[in-house]
Image (cartoon, coloured by chain):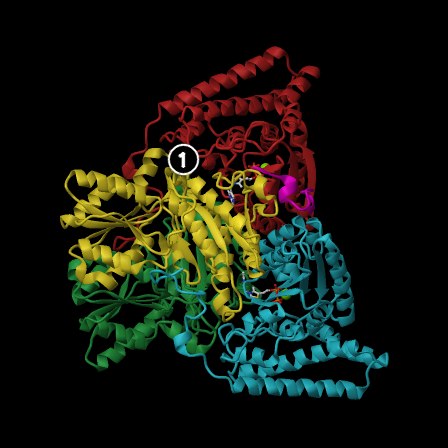
Chain colours: A cyan, B green, C red, D yellow
């Protein structure tokens, strides 16, 4: 039994348990604002993160708890952030949509759809210019591909041959609008190809397939070939956000996708291949539950940022004093 | 007359407009199948079909521009930009095209466009989802800007905007959608272009609009308990400003507190203040005070967000300030 | 001799002579602001306009004198507009970049690059919704294809199957930036195809080829197939604007393209095919010169818009009066 | 010290910054091969190469966002948005990302970004190429805004902005580029964050910035011939405003005329006026007057454009108005 296979399982389970708890905490009004769950899509974040190194950069969206956890952002700091506490990763200023941990090169959730894409281009430009090895992995949804920013970012990354891994999480809905209602061409790999970017569509429910595709793409990027594009076919098992009554999707469609739950698929694979025993999986689950409990406890005990610090960090320093720099 | 929510007020007007004129169509992200992010168009797809209640891809610049073109071509689009935060992506079309085309072509081109959007903070949505910015729209000649603060206005203003031949931006403060008020669905719309005194008073004037009206009225109640009677003026139309009404209230009370959820620097309150200086300077017995948002990207945590926004307590303080010479 | 062949020549010559005069008038400071000449690209505008009907709509850019003239906008009203006179088509309010004549369904020069594309989508939506026969022809440059608005407009037009003819005037430069320096993929037909739009690249110096391609595309659009895309390879013989010293282009490149002057090419063809005699061409030239002279005279004699009317037409009517609608 | 044009002032600073720090690069449409639409970067591509003087495709939202990302990643981008009119396409990135990221991440993310852009009217460029809008940027916490009005400031402010760790927007009025003035290329930059009295006076204060400074100085000359001595304050930094300097000049003169090329309603002058009301109300001997652009999309024809913009004659009139009680 190699450690890697179980590690993938561990990460997916951590995310699932964490977010299930988030949903409960939302009902208990411990978490507020917008809350977008990643449940059902865990294989994408975990598979891609598994292929990245510490030097790589991550840009994510408002649906980024999974990415943050898989990248090693502390679950307690993440939960505390959603509680709005000063021990949160952004001291409560960001909330669910703006998780950032720069020490992990996790640059944050960007909540304007498409808004993270140009940022990723810039991070990659910095790596390339400064001769650093990093690749920037940029996550975004199918809906984001209709924004002008997407087009501009693809062109810039390709034109400047930048080390960007574009990761399209095609869960086939932009909020309540189905892919076919927002995209004239639903083959999302066509557009990056029209910008000279090699693009591949991959099963996003199979964590191993995700990781392998990401690894291949990253190799090409690290050779200096410029950006690559991966489209992962996936599905969110929950509504778009806690405000969404989810009336626009067919029950049978949801059921069909739930039958391909990435956690269940991978568990089956591990068991079938003899890579894990049932007890291993139970232990992973127990550990994840314990981690979530600890995260909640950590968040509960967090203080509130003093109101005197409200305007702290708007600027690095004050320039209005005479003689200021 | 019945009790209804603000979002029902909007919906009633959208339905009316769709029924009245076959050239009308709704356009925006999730206005159809989903029923609108704030449920303002719930049920309308079923009644009018997908051509008249048209879901747009995530492409704010594109679909706002398309609405402008459609208006030029003879349709009467009513666009929903989900929130003002995303409207930043569409400003080129609104400012460079919608606002300029009539003048730039010497009246050849008309742009009978209505653009509604949710604005404001107060729901712990964080810095990228809590902008106000109605002052930006109010800065632009060629646009009109309406800010409904009541359920009736939420309805009336959509209809009035639809009747107007020029581009009108309607800013709907998102905390208002679930609030309730009286709604007369058959009333001929009251002119939306003028301010209304929502509470008469003699000691000072609170001049406000949109989501800040209810906070101002709460403050007025609190002050009344202490024997201070403030007049509360709801601006309603932010461009053109109802200068006469602004001057009139201050001519009655001689003191003004401006309440506005935008950031203070360069917010709408600054313009109201300048208007008072230009038109009612000698009526002022004390400096005008502004109660606006603190100059910070709106934070998520509730206590921080609350501290960043205007509140009845801050308004009460400001009124006492202008009454007692403190500012 | 059919009238049509000579008509194409007439239009191209009118544009050439008109714009040559514009350049002179600019030096004489009769025309001010930005002035972008179409010289060298006339075959595109003339060929496409030749294929359109009166019901069709036109959206152009700041480089639109040629399109306006070919569409039948009065040369005098056009010149007067550039003189800033009240007999100009926009009473002097628009200038060179904002020529509009709604009676000809010529909706104007749009001077924000890419800004006309969504407008064209909307005009087409109006035609389709109202059951009118028109197609909207939307002109834009190679540079415009990098703007987000371009991507958004292509998707909208294709998704909604709208009658739009996208006309890309690929003169291979966006101001001083060569195509290869602004486009990762210099095959500009790839992108529309990625949006499900049939796209074709055509020689833009051959007015007949342009007209034929436009005619074919328009037929398809009128059948209800949705938008089409034509990329015309062309070249501007002059600098980007009157402010441009044109230092970024190779002299030999310019010479190579000038050797394919669309007017000369077409004149040769007419003569070779016996469709015109030299005298016909001379007569066309003389008529064009006379028309330009008359346009200048018309402009010279125009008055100035009264300053009291400065704010006229900002709004249709005033709403501030009590009791106003 | 030598005579130089404003564009040379900018260019000197860009060259200095590029030489000083290998992390600096220029980014914008036509900044390289073409040398900049206003020739501010002419010659720099040749000196520093295409990676440090980087031509951008026409994609304002994209390349401004990329610059923000590059700044986050350790570079020091100096972006040129050809004109503010096109900056409308990039406002999402500037307002939702550049301005929020530091606060929203509790200081984890820095965005040391400089964005320069040409602004203003006066060159007969018509409604889509004549915006001001510096008041919009000045409204946004997280951004700083500089408006160089002199050749020296054109240089100094680029360098100061570059030294600042936060996003700075520099608005360069396009009529200034060919104007000449003194330039000391070796001077340590004067703090750009404070206003400067460009002409002392006792009878009234003209408070202005950018392209309106020279018009204000001409008006001051004309008034001096009639024995009226006005003080001219150049704001220089539009966010944060130098409140102390604004209060100080009016404390000396007791009358103020605000000159600003933006449209009057909600323009920068409104904020200066509100500042005076809040901080110097009892110093004011007359209502404050504003000389701003007329509320119209700027027309092409010269006589109409001239009539739409602030002019020395209008400033003179306004000063006489505040002196004689007319407004
Ligand atoms: C520019 C912009 N427009 C609209 C929204 C509102 N919104 C938030 S998420 C979303 C759907 C995005 O869909 P997709 O990109 O497929 O991502 P998913 O949520 O499916 O992960 C919308 C419309 C937004 N945040 N930003
Ligand atoms: C959004 C925007 N950015 C920049 C400009 C300045 N500009 C005007 S024309 C032009 C080049 C456009 O090139 P292209 O689209 O190829 O058209 P061409 O001028 O070659 O006909 C630029 C950069 C503008 N008008 N609008
Ligand atoms: Mg999606
Ligand atoms: Mg070109």
Near mark 1 (Cα within 10 A), the count class, few <14, some 14-19 or many ≥20, is: many
Q: Is mark 1 within 8 Å of ligand 2?
A: no
Q: Is residue C296 visible?
A: yes
Q: Which residues are magenta?
A: C176-190
- Closer-to-camera residue (C185/C310): C185
Task: Tell me the subunit letter for badge 1.
Answer: C
Q: Quadrant of the C terminus of chain B?
A: bottom left
Q: Is residue C2 left or right of residue A221?
A: left
Q: Quadrant of residue A309?
A: bottom left
The tally of labels here is 1
- Closer-to-camera residue (C299/B258): B258
Q: Quadrant of the N terminus of chain B?
A: bottom left
Based on the picture, tell me whether residue C179 belongs to the magenta stretch. Answer: yes
Q: Position of residue A222 (x, y in %)?
A: 73, 58
Q: Farthest residue in the right direction?
A: A273
Q: Position of residue D119 (x, y in %)?
A: 41, 45
- Whether A138 is drawn above or below D78: the answer is below
- Closer-to-camera residue (B67/D206): D206
Ligand 3 - quadrant of the structure image: bottom right
Q: Position of residue B136 (x, y in %)?
A: 39, 56
Based on the picture, tell me whether residue B242 belongs to the magenta stretch. Answer: no
Task: Identify the residue at horizontal 68%, vertical 30% (top origin).
Answer: C209
Task: Identify the residue at horizontal 70%, vertical 39% (top origin).
Answer: C200
Q: Position of residue D221 (x, y in %)?
A: 22, 39
Q: Quadrant of residue D219?
A: top left
Q: Farthest residue in the top direction?
A: C279
- Whether A187 is drawn above or below D226: the answer is below
- Closer-to-camera residue (C211/D130): D130
SS at mark 1 in the image: loop
Q: Is residue C163 visible?
A: no
The residue tagged 1 is: C90
Q: Quadrant of residue B249?
A: bottom left
């Amino acid at each position: 039994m190699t450690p890697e296979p179980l590690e993938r399982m561990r990460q997916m389970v951590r995310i699932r348990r964490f977010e299930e708890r988030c949903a409960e905490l939302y009902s208990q009004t411990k978490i507020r604002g917008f809350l977008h769950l990643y449940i059902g899509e865990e294989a994408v974040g975990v598979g891609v993160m598994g292929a990245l190194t510490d030097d790589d950069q991550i840009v994510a969206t408002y649906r980024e708890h999974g990415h943050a956890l898989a990248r090693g952002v502390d679950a307690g700091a993440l939960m505390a952030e959603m509680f709005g506490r000063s021990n949160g990763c952004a001291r409560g200023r960001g909330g669910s949509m703006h998780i950032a941990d720069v020490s992990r090169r996790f640059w944050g959730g960007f909540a304007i759809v498409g808004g993270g894409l140009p940022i990723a281009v810039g991070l990659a430009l910095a790596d390339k210019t400064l001769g650093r090895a990093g690749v920037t992995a940029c996550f975004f949804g199918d809906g984001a591909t209709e924004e002008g920013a997407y087009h501009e970012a693809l062109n810039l990354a390709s034109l400047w041959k930048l080390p960007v891994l574009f990761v399209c999480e095609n869960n086939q809905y932009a909020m309540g609008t189905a892919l076919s209602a927002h995209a004239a061409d639903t083959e999302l790999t066509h557009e990056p190809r029209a910008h000279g970017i090699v693009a591949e569509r991959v099963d996003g429910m199979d964590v191993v397939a995700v990781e392998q595709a990401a690894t291949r793409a990253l190799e090409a990027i690290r050779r200096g070939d410029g950006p690559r594009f991966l489209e992962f076919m996936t599905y969110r098992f929950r509504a778009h956000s806690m405000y969404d009554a989810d009336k626009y999707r067919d029950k049978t469609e949801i059921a069909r996708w739930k039958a391909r739950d990435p956690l269940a698929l991978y568990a089956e694979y591990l068991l079938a291949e003899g890579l894990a025993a049932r007890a291993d999986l139970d232990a992973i689950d127990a550990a994840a539950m314990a981690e979530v409990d600890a995260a909640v406890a950590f968040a509960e005990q967090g203080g509130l940022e003093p109101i005197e610090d409200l305007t702290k960090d708007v600027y690095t320093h004050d320039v209005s004093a005479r003689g200021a720099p | 007359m019945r009790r209804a929510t603000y979002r029902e007020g909007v919906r009633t007007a959208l339905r009316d407009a769709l029924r009245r004129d076959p050239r009308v169509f709704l356009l925006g992200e999730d206005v159809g199948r989903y029923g609108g992010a704030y449920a303002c168009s719930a049920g309308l797809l079923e009644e009018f079909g997908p051509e008249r209640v048209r879901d747009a891809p995530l492409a704010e610049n594109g679909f706002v521009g398309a609405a402008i073109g459609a208006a030029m071509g003879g349709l009467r689009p009513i666009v929903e930009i989900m929130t003002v935060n995303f409207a930043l992506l569409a400003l080129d079309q609104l400012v460079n095209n919608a606002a300029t085309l009539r003048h730039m072509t010497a009246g050849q081109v008309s742009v009978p466009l209505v653009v509604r959007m949710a604005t404001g903070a107060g729901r712990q949505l964080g810095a990228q989802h809590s902008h106000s910015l109605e002052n930006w729209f109010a800065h632009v000649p060629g646009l009109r800007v309406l800010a409904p603060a009541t359920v009736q206005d939420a309805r009336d203003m959509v209809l009035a905007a639809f009747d107007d031949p020029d581009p009108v931006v309607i800013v709907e403060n998102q905390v208002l959608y679930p609030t309730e008020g009286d709604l007369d669905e058959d009333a001929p719309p009251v002119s939306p272009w003028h301010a209304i005194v929502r509470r008469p008073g003699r000691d000072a004037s609170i001049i406000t609009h949109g989501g800040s009206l209810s906070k101002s009225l709460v403050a007025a109640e609190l002050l009344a308990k202490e024997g201070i009677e403030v007049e509360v003026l709801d601006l309603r139309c932010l461009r053109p400003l109802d200068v006469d009404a602004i001057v009139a209230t201050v001519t009655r009370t001689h003191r003004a507190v401006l309440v506005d959820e935008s950031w203070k620097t360069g917010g709408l309150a600054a313009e109201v203040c300048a208007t008072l200086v230009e038109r009612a300077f000698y009526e002022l017995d004390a400096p005008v005070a502004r109660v606006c948002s603190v100059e910070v990207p709106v934070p998520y945590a509730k206590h921080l967000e609350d501290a960043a926004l205007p509140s009845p307590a801050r308004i009460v303080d400001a009124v006492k300030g202008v009454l007692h010479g403190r500012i």
